[in-house]
Image (cartoon, rainbow, N blue to C red):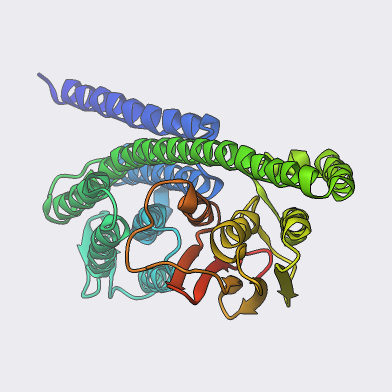
């Protein structure tokens, strides 16, 4: 095989490799743009990473063509090779930072961007100082004292990527860390390969590795968001089931109270039916919704039920101390707890009292439902059955829909206190 034939063979090998890499990146960009599961932040990060990797491929080919004598740059050969090398060293750590941001977007970014800016500034000194690298008159690359700074920054960032992947998913499924960790290892091996190889190639090991890693990251993000979407749909379905369970419970108990009034006080029962009918026409739609509703609307449900109970039991008092009314909560949150306090706590007492308090604390909203009823042993788990279905139901919806908490404390013979804490939402904090 002649030298010209060898060159032609190498050329087509490079072309085939380039086409494969470019098709991977372009296919990934198209898939990312069309993927409805990928969030906007991650979509932008992946597209930017793919664009930077494409630019590194172009840079590598220009460097290879100029240094190999396939492209004549004339007197500008040294300056062009210097600029291309500076660009390569400056951009590679940026791609690693984007991988880190994809793995854990909520972390602090400025220290990483500070490192890549410092790295770029150091390599820019090659324009007037040979401390990082320089090219000889014949285009031969010579590394200076600071020539390994990019590799040092890259290893620091890769080390950070490794621990970010471990930390981000240590509390959930361990196998979710496999792809980020695999990518870390692949990029490290590619950096080592570029560091110690003596063969001039148009496509560096790191560029090829980053291409594959970007594709792996897209697949990983897609699977992660599909799973999160399925979990969200499942949680929404569970919430709708809970609403469907508690809505008939509320209506049945209210109608039962009205039924009891029919024999005790028919006129009061008639007024109550009229009032309750008007209430249903206005508010039945909101009772069935699975979204958050204003506290005002939830208190309307609660007051309607409490007033009907008070018609049957005049000794019962329900007091409201609403210091901070402007926040959202799941529908049928307070009413089932007040119903529980009345029916299982204070209904039979001469001076039965249920108190509802809402207030604002440093980290969120607090709702307290307190009664002076019979109480129960709160050291035992809330057993199954109608008596505590309201508490269990409300607790799960508060946790899933608001990331909040519900705590119960009770003393036999003294009463029960339920405390709901709902963290601030971003738009209301």
Does residue 343 appear to the left or right of 176 in the view shown? right
Residue in front for this viewpoint, 300 or 176: 300
**Residue 68: x %, y % from top left:** 26, 42
Query: Is 181 placed above or below 414 here?
Result: above
Expressed as whole percent of the image width and height from the top left, the position of residue 206 reads 25, 48
Residue 321 position by quadrant: bottom right
312 horizontally vs 411: left or right = right
**Considering depth in this image, is 337 or 171 the residue closer to the camera?**
337
- Residue 135 visible in the snapshot: no
| Residue occupying image coordinates x 27% and y 54% | 139
In the figure, 138 relative to 351: above or below? above
Is 201 rendered above or below residue 315?
A: above
What quarter of the picture does the N terminus occupy?
top left
The percent coordinates of residue 352 (x first, y second) are 64, 71
Seen in the image, is 322 located left or right of residue 57? right
Between 210 and 229, the residue placed more toward the observer is 229
């Amino acid at each position: 095989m002649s030298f010209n034939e060898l060159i032609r063979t190498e050329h087509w090998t490079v072309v085939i490799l380039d086409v494969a890499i470019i098709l991977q990146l372009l296919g990934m960009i198209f898939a990312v743009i069309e993927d409805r599961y990928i969030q906007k932040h991650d979509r932008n990060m992946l597209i930017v990473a793919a664009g930077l990797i494409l630019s590194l491929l172009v840079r590598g080919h220009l460097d290879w063509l100029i240094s190999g004598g396939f492209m004549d740059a004339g007197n500008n050969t040294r300056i062009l090779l210097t600029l291309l090398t500076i660009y390569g060293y400056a951009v590679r750590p940026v791609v690693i930072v984007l991988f880190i941001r994809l793995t854990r977007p909520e972390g602090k970014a400025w220290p990483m961007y500070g490192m890549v800016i410092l790295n770029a500034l150091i390599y820019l000194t090659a324009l007037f100082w040979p401390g990082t690298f320089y090219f000889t008159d014949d285009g031969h690359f010579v590394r200076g004292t600071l020539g390994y700074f990019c590799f040092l920054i890259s290893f620091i960032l890769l080390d950070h990527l490794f621990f970010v992947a471990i930390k981000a998913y240590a509390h959930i499924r361990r196998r979710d860390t496999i792809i980020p960790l695999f990518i870390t290892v692949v990029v490290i091996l590619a950096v080592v390969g570029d560091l110690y190889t003596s063969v001039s190639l148009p496509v560096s090991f790191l560029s090829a590795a980053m291409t594959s890693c970007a594709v792996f990251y897209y697949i990983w993000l897609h699977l992660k968001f599909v799973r999160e979407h399925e979990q969200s749909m499942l949680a929404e379905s569970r919430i709708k089931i809970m609403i469907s369970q508690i809505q008939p419970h509320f209506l049945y108990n209210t109608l039962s109270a009205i039924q009891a009034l029919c024999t005790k006080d028919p006129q009061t029962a008639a007024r109550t039916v009229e009032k309750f009918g008007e209430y249903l026409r206005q508010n039945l739609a909101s009772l069935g919704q699975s979204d958050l509703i204003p506290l005002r609307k939830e208190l309307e449900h609660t007051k309607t039920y409490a007033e009907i109970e008070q018609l049957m039991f005049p000794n019962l008092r329900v007091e409201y101390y609403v210091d901070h009314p402007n926040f959202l909560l799941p529908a049928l949150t307070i009413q089932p707890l007040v119903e529980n306090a009345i029916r299982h706590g204070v209904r039979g007492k001469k001076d039965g009292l249920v108190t509802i308090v809402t207030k604002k604390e440093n980290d969120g909203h607090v709702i307290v439902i307190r009664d002076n009823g019979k109480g129960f042993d709160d050291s035992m788990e809330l057993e199954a059955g109608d008596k505590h279905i309201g508490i269990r139901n409300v607790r799960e919806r508060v946790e899933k829909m608001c990331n909040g908490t519900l705590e119960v404390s009770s003393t036999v013979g003294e009463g029960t206190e339920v405390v709901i804490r709902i963290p601030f939402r971003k738009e209301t904090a």
